[in-house]
Image (cartoon, helix red, strand yellow):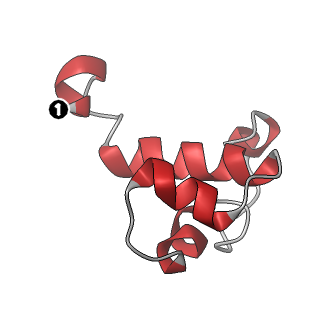
Amino acid sequence: MVQLLLGPLFTAHFQKAGFVTVAKANGAEDLEITNETKHRTTTLILHYNRRRNGRKRNASEKLGL
């Protein structure tokens, strides 16, 4: 659905990872984030948080993504 609206580069994972990263950067707690993302546990928050998952530094970090 996301790809139909925004194009092939914007996957559901891309959107969730951006949301989680920005939310964590602004002080949101894992439980608050899972209430939005509809995950059953907070475990996947670590996976979606781009600042914590070990990716190389890049320009998206400067945007808070």
**How many numbered marks appear?**
1
**Residue at (47% x, 48% y) in the render:** 36
Q: Say if 30 sits above or below 13 in the image.
A: below
Q: Residues within 10 Å of mark 1 (few under 14, many from 20)?
A: few
Which residue is nearer to you in this view: 23 or 2? Answer: 23
The x and y percentages for residue 59 are 74, 39
Badge 1 marks a residue whose secondary structure is loop
The residue labelled by disc 1 is 1
Q: Is 1 situated left or right of 32 in this image?
A: left
Image quadrant holding the C terminus, namely: top right
Q: Is 27 situated left or right of 50 in this image?
A: right
The x and y percentages for residue 18 are 56, 44
Q: Quadrant of residue 60?
A: top right
The x and y percentages for residue 58 are 73, 48
Q: Is 39 situated left or right of 57 in this image?
A: left
**Residue at (68% x, 74% y) in the render:** 54
**Residue at (38% x, 52% y) in the render:** 13
Q: Say if 31 sits above or below 19 in the image.
A: below
Q: Quadrant of residue 8?
A: top left
Give the amino acid type for the residue marked by disc 1 in the picture: Met
**Residue at (81% x, 38% y) in the render:** 62
Which residue is nearer to you in this view: 18 or 41? Answer: 41
Image quadrant holding the N terminus, namely: top left
